[in-house]
Image (cartoon, rainbow, N blue to C red):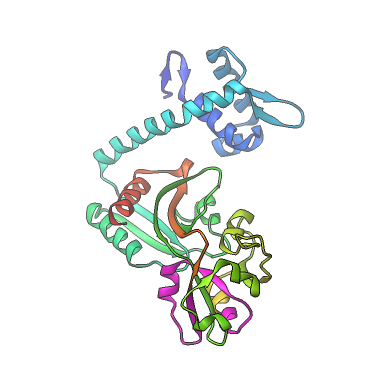
């Protein structure tokens, strides 16, 4: 049964929100499991209720009208709050149960495991799977529904993903071979990164994220020579140990992966690294919100 408000169906609002993300009637229909013509029908019905055009559609592109843009900005938080209220009531009635799949990059350190333990103690009826996700594909498992939430390195600029608690802001660390000139230093300045190749992360990680982990230039504008691209953290550490380049790491990962053939040197002059919990807006559940609360409380 459809929820209605003054003749307005929630399905119309849901359709508009998805169309605003996809800007494509066909993909919107696929996500909502309806035909493209049904998407058009729902949008037209919503526009009749509003009394103005919200979506501008030509043979080449779909975009929001100025009113549609304003409507989206006001609607999104209200819709999320409504859905959250319903999900919370359902969870309170049934208890949070089922399976929560949690992804992590690099290292599931003590804070993540403490958050998992806290979540279990609060919701004993819910099981968890903890899954390592590829360094080169930080957001893909969340987009594809392979995990329900993931702890990833920032930044996150992915449409459709919600960024929850941000934690573990710490000075970045450079992993180098023990034979590297930087290995004996107490710190390395960001400008010194121009003196040798920097190991990067390969696609499909988005370009903005790859450049954050391996910048192409120093803050002063000096070019940093590109090193080999890697798919996994272990590949990067192995190449660094072999002298093929240096690799920037967050401090918890450096601490966890100490090895005799690598030196880990703090880097000054770069923004701190940070971790964040992300999940997909369309698949947000009481479980993901409860785990987000546990992460916030622990970190």
Tell me the quarter of the image containing the C terminus: bottom left
Considering depth in this image, is 104 or 192 the residue closer to the camera? 192
Vertical placement of residue 234 versus 32, above or below:
below
Considering depth in this image, is 195 or 236 the residue closer to the camera? 195
Question: Could one spot residue 197 in this view of the protein?
Answer: no
Question: Could one spot residue 212 in this view of the protein?
Answer: yes
Considering depth in this image, is 32 or 288 the residue closer to the camera? 288
Q: Is residue 200 left or right of residue 265?
A: right
Tell me the quarter of the image containing the N terminus: top left
Q: Position of residue 140 (x, y in %)?
A: 55, 55
Magenta segment includes 228: no
Question: What residue appears at the point 64 percent right and 56 percent down from the top-left corner?
Answer: 207
Question: What residue appears at the point 64 percent right and 30 percent down from the top-left corner?
Answer: 36
Vertical placement of residue 67 versus 191, above or below:
above
Question: What residue appears at the point 60 percent right and 59 percent down from the top-left corner?
Answer: 219
Q: Where is residue 59 in the image (x, y as percent from the top left)?
A: 77, 28
Count the marks: how many? 0
Q: What stretch is highlighted in magenta?
A: 238-265
Q: Where is residue 253 in the image (x, y as percent from the top left)?
A: 44, 70
Kindly give the residue lying farthest to the front in the view shown.
220
Considering depth in this image, is 129 or 211 the residue closer to the camera? 211
Vertical placement of residue 198 versus 263, above or below:
above
Please tell me in which quadrant of the rendered image residue 231 appears.
bottom right
Q: Where is residue 50 in the image (x, y as percent from the top left)?
A: 54, 15
Magenta segment includes 254: yes
């Amino acid at each position: 049964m459809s929820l209605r408000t003054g003749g307005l169906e929630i399905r119309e609002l849901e359709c508009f929100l998805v169309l605003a993300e996809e800007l494509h009637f066909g993909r919107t229909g696929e996500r909502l499991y309806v035909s493209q013509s049904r998407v058009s029908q729902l949008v037209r019905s919503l526009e009749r209720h509003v009394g103005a055009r919200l979506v501008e559609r030509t043979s080449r592109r779909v975009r929001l009208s100025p009113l549609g843009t304003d409507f989206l900005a006001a609607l999104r938080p209200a819709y999320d709050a409504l859905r959250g209220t319903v999900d919370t009531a359902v969870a309170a009635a049934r208890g949070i149960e089922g399976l929560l799949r949690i992804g992590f990059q690099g290292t599931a350190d003590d804070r993540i495991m403490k958050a998992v333990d806290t979540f279990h103690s609060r919701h004993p009826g819910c099981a968890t799977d903890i899954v390592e996700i590829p360094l080169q594909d930080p957001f893909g498992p969340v987009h594809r529904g392979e995990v329900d939430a993931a702890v990833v390195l920032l930044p996150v600029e992915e449409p459709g993903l919600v960024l929850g608690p941000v934690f573990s802001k710490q000075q970045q660390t450079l992993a180098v071979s023990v034979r590297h000139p930087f290995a004996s230093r107490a710190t390395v300045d960001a400008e010194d990164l121009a003196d040798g190749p920097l190991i990067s992360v390969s696609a499909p990680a988005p370009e903005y994220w790859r450049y954050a982990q391996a910048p192409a230039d120093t803050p002063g504008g000096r070019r940093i020579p590109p090193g080999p691209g890697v798919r996994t953290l272990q590949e990067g550490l192995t190449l660094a140990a072999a002298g093929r380049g240096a690799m920037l790491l967050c401090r918890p990962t450096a601490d966890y992966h100490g090895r005799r053939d690598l030196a880990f040197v703090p880097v000054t002059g770069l923004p701190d690294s940070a971790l964040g919990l992300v999940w997909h807006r369309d698949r947000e559940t009481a479980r993901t919100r409860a785990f987000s609360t546990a992460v916030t409380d622990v970190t």
